[in-house]
């Protein structure tokens, strides 16, 4: 479903080290159930065959700008 888009570039947040951060509101067991690295590797592999590219960005301040309006 992720690759069923017209976009040529897929952007993911770089979640490296997310398990190291502890927050009293996060359920650590639930976070460790998601193999993000494996998902990213599969998406990159399949995107390559469809002529798409996958990039990761630093998640800091990504929610500051609305992607539709740019404000």
Image: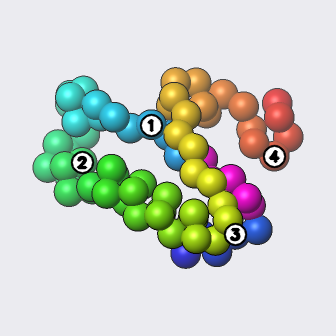
**Residue of label 2:** 31
**What residue is drawn where x is 20% and y is 57%?**
33
Q: Quadrant of residue 18?
A: top left
Distance, label 2 to label 3, CA atoms, is: 27 Å
Magenta region: 7-11
Q: Is residue 39 left or right of residue 50?
A: left
The residue furthest right is: 69
Distance, label 4 to label 3, CA atoms, is: 16 Å
Distance, label 2 to label 4, CA atoms, is: 29 Å
**What residue is drawn where x is 63% and y is 54%?**
53
| Tag of residue 64 | none
- N-terminal-most mark, 1 or 4: 1
Q: Is residue 3 left or right of residue 32?
A: right
Magenta segment: does it hold 10?
yes
In this view, 65 is above or below 32? above
> SS of the residue at dot 4?
loop
**Residue of label 4:** 68
| Tag of residue 14 | 1
Distance, label 1 to label 3, CA atoms, is: 21 Å
**What residue is drawn where x is 67% and y is 65%?**
51
- In the picture, the quarter occupied by the C terminus is top right
**Residue of label 3:** 5
**Residue 1 location, x and y as percent?**
55, 75
């Amino acid at each position: 479903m992720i690759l069923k888009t017209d976009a040529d570039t897929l952007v993911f947040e770089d979640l490296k080290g997310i398990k190291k951060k502890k927050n009293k509101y996060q359920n650590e067991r639930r976070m460790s159930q998601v193999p993000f690295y494996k998902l990213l590797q599969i998406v990159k592999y399949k995107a390559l065959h469809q002529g798409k590219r996958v990039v990761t960005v630093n998640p800091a301040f990504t929610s500051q700008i609305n992607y539709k309006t740019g404000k």
